[in-house]
Every structure is written in structure tokens, then in C-alpha cells.
Amino acid sequence: MSGLDWPGLMRAGIRGQGLRPAEFWALTPAELMLMLGGAGGASGMSRAGLEALARRFPDETEEQA
């Protein structure tokens, strides 16, 4: 038996988040914890990080322009 509080998680997901039962059961525990505001995961990308990523992987190449 796992240490998860399934009744509490179901209340939070179905009643609290408005998920349908099928949607609740389709989530991974990590996805559910993210939706419920649980800890974990990295912070969002900074503007500088986004710009560096866009330079590295441009939408168009010079040949397409």
C-alpha cells in the first residue's frame, strides 16, 4: 500500500480543481502535484534564456527567408 492520501488527492483534484474522474486518473502523480501547487520543478525560463534559445534554434534559416 502506498503512502499517498488518495481520498484527499481525489477531493483536491476532482472537487478542488474541477477535474472529471477520468482526467484525474489520467494524470501522473507529478502532474497532479504541479496542478495543486506542490513543490518541485525548476523556475520559469528567464528572458535572457529564451533569447539564447531562440538564437540557437531560429524559426527560419537564412535559406528560408
Image (cartoon, rainbow, N blue to C red):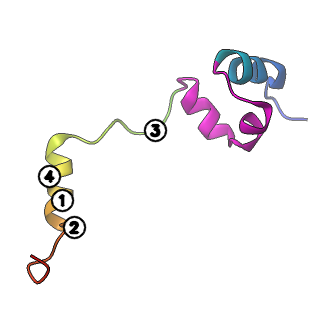
Secondary structure category for the residue under label 1: helix
Q: Is residue 33 left or right of residue 25?
A: left
Quadrant, the C terminus: bottom left
Of the two numbered discs 3 and 1 in the rendering, the one whose residue sits closer to the viewer: 1
Estimate the spatial distance between the alpha carbons at disc 2 and disc 1, rounded to whole Å: 5 Å
Q: Position of residue 19 (x, y in %)?
A: 69, 28
Q: Which residue is disc 4 drawn over?
A: 51
Q: Is residue 13 above or below residue 44?
A: above
Estimate the spatial distance between the alpha carbons at disc 3 and disc 4, rounded to whole Å: 21 Å
Estimate the spatial distance between the alpha carbons at disc 3 and disc 1, rounded to whole Å: 22 Å
Q: Position of residue 58 (x, y in %)?
A: 18, 67
Estimate the spatial distance between the alpha carbons at disc 2 and disc 3, rounded to whole Å: 24 Å
User: Label 1 neighbourhood size at 10 Å, few (<14), some (14-19), many (20+)?
Assistant: few
Secondary structure category for the residue under label 3: loop
Q: Position of residue 30 (x, y in %)?
A: 62, 39
Secondary structure category for the residue under label 2: loop
Residue at 35% from the left image edge and 35% from the top image edge: 43
Q: Are marks 3 and 1 in contact (CB under 8 Å)?
A: no
Q: Which residue is disc 1 drawn over?
A: 54
Residue 27 quadrant: top right
Q: Is residue 48 above or below residue 16?
A: below
Residue at 72% from the left image edge and 16% from the top image edge: 15
Amino acid type, callout 3: Gly
Q: Are marks 2 and 1 in contact (CB under 8 Å)?
A: yes
Estimate the spatial distance between the alpha carbons at disc 1 and disc 4, rounded to whole Å: 5 Å
Q: Which residue is disc 2 drawn over?
A: 57
Q: Are marks 1 and 4 in contact (CB under 8 Å)?
A: yes
Q: Which residue is disc 3 drawn over?
A: 41
Of the two numbered discs 2 and 3 in the rendering, the one whose residue sits closer to the viewer: 2
Nearer to the camera, 6 or 26: 26
Q: Which residues are magenta?
A: 17-38
